[in-house]
Image (cartoon, rainbow, N blue to C red):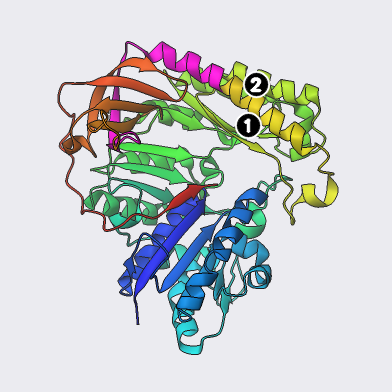
Amino acid sequence: MPGKLYMETVGCQMSVLDSELVVGTLRRQGYSLVSAPAGADVVLFNTCSIRESVEEKVYLALDSLKKLKRLNPDAVIGVLGCMAQKDQEKVFARAPHVDLVCGPGALADIPDLIATIQRTRTPQSSFSLGRKEGPRRDVEESFASWDPEREPGGRPTPFQAFVRTQFGCDKFCTYCIVPAVRGPEQGRDPDELCEEVRRLADQGVVEITLVGQTVNSYRHGKLRFADLLARLDAIRGIERIKFVSSFPNDMTDDLLQAVRDLPKVAPWLHVPAQSGSDTVLARMKRHYTVGGFLEMVARARATIPGVSISGDFIVGFCGETDADFQATCDLVRAGRFKSSFIYQYSTRPGTKAHTDLPDDVPLEVKKLRNNELLAVQSEVSRGITRELVGTSMEILVEGPSRRANREGFENQLHGRTATDHAVVFDGGEELVGRFVTVHIEEATSLTLFGRLEGAPRTEVRTPPAPRSRLPVVLG
């Protein structure tokens, strides 16, 4: 009998989307979403496997659920996603009170798995990746079975949504577990994608973010990513289109021109560089050089006026010397990244680096390099945001700012520009979900502060009110 559901997400945007789809599926079975594990009949963790520290956080969270299981032996506790696919039986061994382990290619099986657990009181698992011969339930079929119908309550806001363009990855970077846990790269049918986006627009969504492991590598027959953007740009009701994360070698001229020419496509490119050293890039098997990356950045800036570029970097990868690291600092400065996600390398069992390359950079050195690169990025970001002071920028208002619950900040709202800059200003809650113009008066390295100008550009249709939101920890 359906009851209360708690879902927590630890991972990237694709994990957030997977959680939304699972929640939507279970809601249609009659489950209600709750904001805490206590009292829930089903507790699910959707997991990331990119870094060891993230996995350990999940295992600590699972340990904390032992008491819940003692109080309610019938509660179903499950681990989903990339960590589940990678660890499989290890999850049951480390957390014997877990009932369900399900990989990202088998999430459509979850309602049946939960029902089996409740009926038999035996643990269940399901894993499916890649293409199979003969009768199959591959990841392409799972798209159609549970991507389409979604509910606003599963998203961070009811007027923004992630849309998956592809599943899996074929790049096989030596440090990355994704090809092993999410399978081969498969682009979704563009007709299905467009129909999904039309349904989201009908629900009140005005901004979509297209997600894929290397989103700009999308192919479906002869249709390329630039062609897909053109089709989505024509959908009525959608006002802004973003996409993450891109692969440098697939940032083609026709794609840059599409970003420039299509009115709804945001002039923001998130392109992971990972390192500023050719030696390290070769060891990572990234298939480009620093010179090639900077050439791509130069083409982007020459093609798209005012383009904003952000990135990802790994510090302390196998064999990284002080000179290699300083080259990465130089790339952050030369590339003028708006912002960057910076990670300390941790070896992942199942990857080429784990088997073939020694993890030989000491942890204390990784921490020092992480902090130094953060300081370099902060300096670059501060220079970029200062240039925006005195300008007026259109933002989509996402909700109250983090400080809105403090005295003196009750009317403070936050939103993002098309270039993905965070903006904070004073305004009424009736502006949430609308596009407004804000005059920028102050700036830090991370945030712009300003005052509201004029009236909202559009009267955004009022979407259904969310019943609850999914806890999300980006990995």
Measured in 3D between alpha carbons, the distance from the residue under mark 1 to the one under mark 2, in whole angstroms, is: 9 Å
**Tag 1 residue:** 273
Residue drawn at (36%, 38%) of the image = 241
Q: Label 2 belongs to which residue?
A: 331
The answer to whether 96 appears left or right of 359 in the picture is left
Q: Is residue 105 visible?
A: yes
**Which residue does the image show at 76% across and 27% down from the upper left?**
278
Q: Which residue is depicted at the point 46% across and 81% down?
A: 74
Say whether residue 441 is left or right of residue 96: left
Report x, y in % for residue 126. Answer: 57, 73
Total residue callouts:
2
> For residue 416, what is the image quadrant?
top left
Taking the image as shown, residue 234 lies to the left or right of residue 99, namely left
Please state the horizontal and vertical placement of residue 461, each as a whole percent of the image.
17, 44
Q: Horizontally, is 317 left or right of 102 in the view? A: right
Q: Does 390 appear in magenta?
A: yes
Residue 32 x/y as whole percent:
31, 68
- Which one is in front, 224 or 466? 466
Contact (Cβ within 8 Å) of mark 1 with mark 2:
yes
Earlier along the polypeptide chain: callout 1 or callout 2?
A: 1
Q: Specify start and end residues of the magenta stretch as a single range.
A: 378-403
Residue 343 sits in quarter: top right
Above or below, 373 against 218 in this view is: above
Q: Does residue 207 sit above or below 381 in this rendering?
A: below
Compare residues 434 and 200 and report the one nearer the observer: 434
In the rendered image, residue 169 lying in the magenta stretch gets the answer: no
As helix, strand or loop, the secondary structure at mark 1 comes to loop
* Type of amino acid under label 2: Leu
For the residue marked with disc 1, what is the amino acid? Answer: Ala
